[in-house]
Image (tube, rainbow, N blue to C red):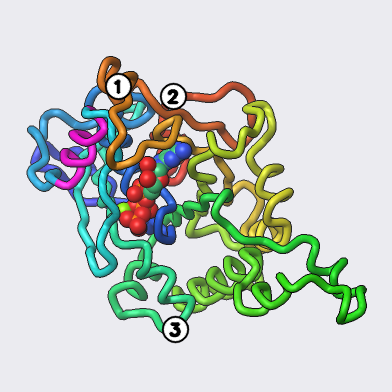
Amino acid sequence: MSHLLHTGAPVRTPELVILGGPNSGKTHYAGQLYGRIRRRPGLLRLRHEQGTPSNLAALEEVLRCLEEGHAASHTSADAWAEVLLPLVDERGNAIDLRWPDYGGEQLRSVFESRAVSDAWRLRLTKADGWILLIRLKSEPTYPDAFEELKKSKEKASSSNTARAVSWDANARWVELLQILLHVAGLGQLSRLQRPRLAVLLSCYDELGAAPQQPPREVLNETLPLMSSFIESTWAPGEASIWGLSSLGCLLEPNSENATFIDEGPEHQGWLVPPEGGTSDTDLTRPLAWLVGSR
Ligand SMILES: Nc1nc2c(ncn2[C@@H]2O[C@H](COP(=O)(O)OP(=O)(O)OP(=O)(O)O)[C@@H](O)[C@H]2O)c(=O)[nH]1
Ligand SMILES: [Mg+2]
C-alpha cells in the first residue's frame, strides 16, 4: 500500500499487527522503539520534515518513566491506542507506520472465548506483517507430564491436577495462531508468504541464553510444538525469530535504575538477530525486515 506526499515522493504505509498477551513487553518495546528512532537511529528513523508527530503522548510517557529509571504501567484491559510513526529507512524510502498498543488481556480473551471482534478481524486481514511477542519465562509447559502418565495413579504427583486446568503454552499458541490465521482468511494448504511473521522472544535477558545461539533454537528447545508449527506454516524466509530485550533488565514501577537515569533509555536494550551472533542495539531491525527494508 502507498500514497503520494505533496512532494510527489511515494510513502509506503505497511500495516502491522502486534500480538502479545499481558506482561509480554509490548508497551516497553514501543517506548524504546520511539526513543531509538528519535535519538539513536538505526535501520529506521523518524522523518523530521514531518515535524514532531502529534499523537505521541503515550510513548512520550513511557520514555519519561524510563528516563526516571522505572517501568511504565500496565495497559488497562480495554485500552487501544495507535500512534503514527513517520519513518525513513536506510535507502531514503518513506514509511508511515501505525503502531498499536493495547491491554494484552484482549488477546487472551480471543483464545479463551474463541471470539474475534470485527476490529481485530479487519486488522488481521489487512496486515502485511505480524509481530508475535512471547515472554518464554512466563510460558507454562509440562515436559515431564508424559513421564508421569506412565506411572500408576497412586504414584503420580498431585501437580497433575494443576496441569489438567492449565494449558501447555505450546498448545495454547498453536491454537491461537490457528484461530488468527482462520479469521484472517489465510489457508494453510500452501506455506504462507504474507503476512511475514516476526517472533520476538521478549525479556530475552531473563533466559540467560548465549547471544551466539540462534533464537530459533531457544524457541525450539522451550516450545517445540509451536516452533515446528511456525516452520511448517510459513514459507522459508518469511518467518524470523529474534531475541528481544527492550530494557536489558527488569524494571519495576518503583525502581530507580541509575543506568537508565544517567545514560538514558536509548542506550539500554538490545536484540539477538535470527542468525545469532553478537547482540545488536538497533531495536528497529525486526520492523525493517517486516516492511521489506531489509
Ligand atoms: N527483564 C526484562 N523485563 C522487561 C523487559 N521489557 C519489559 N519488561 C518488564 O515486563 C513487564 C511488562 O512489560 P510491558 O511492556 O508493560 O508489557 P505489556 O505487554 O505492555 O503488558 P500489558 O500492558 O499488560 O498488555 C514490565 O514490568 C517491564 O518492566 C525486558 O527487556 N527485560
Ligand atoms: Mg502494555
Q: CA distance from mark 1 to mark 3?
A: 42 Å
Q: Is residue 11 above or below residue 212?
A: below
18, above or below 284, in the image = below
Residue 40: mark in rendering: 1
**Marks 1, 3: nearer the viewer:** 3
Kindly indicate whether the residue at mark 1 contacts the one at mark 2 (C-beta within 8 angstroms).
yes
Label disc, if present, on residue 158 of the rendered structure: none
Which residue is label 2 attached to? Answer: 281
Q: Residue shown at 51%/72% (left/top)?
A: 181
Amino acid at pointer 1: Arg
In the rendered image, the vertical position of residue 213 relative to residue 16, given as above or below: above
Residue 292 is drawn in which quadrant? top left
User: Element type at marker 3?
Assistant: helix
Residue 159 magenta-highlighted: no
Q: Residue furthest top?
A: 262
* Sequence-wise first label, 2 or 3: 3
Nearest the viewer among 184 and 35 is 35
User: What span is colored magenta in the figure?
Assistant: 58-67
Q: Which residue is mark 3?
A: 113
Residue 191 position, x and y percent, is: 64, 63
- Residue at coordinates 44% horizontally, 24% vertically from top-left? 281
- Is residue 8 found left or right of 293 in the rendered image? left
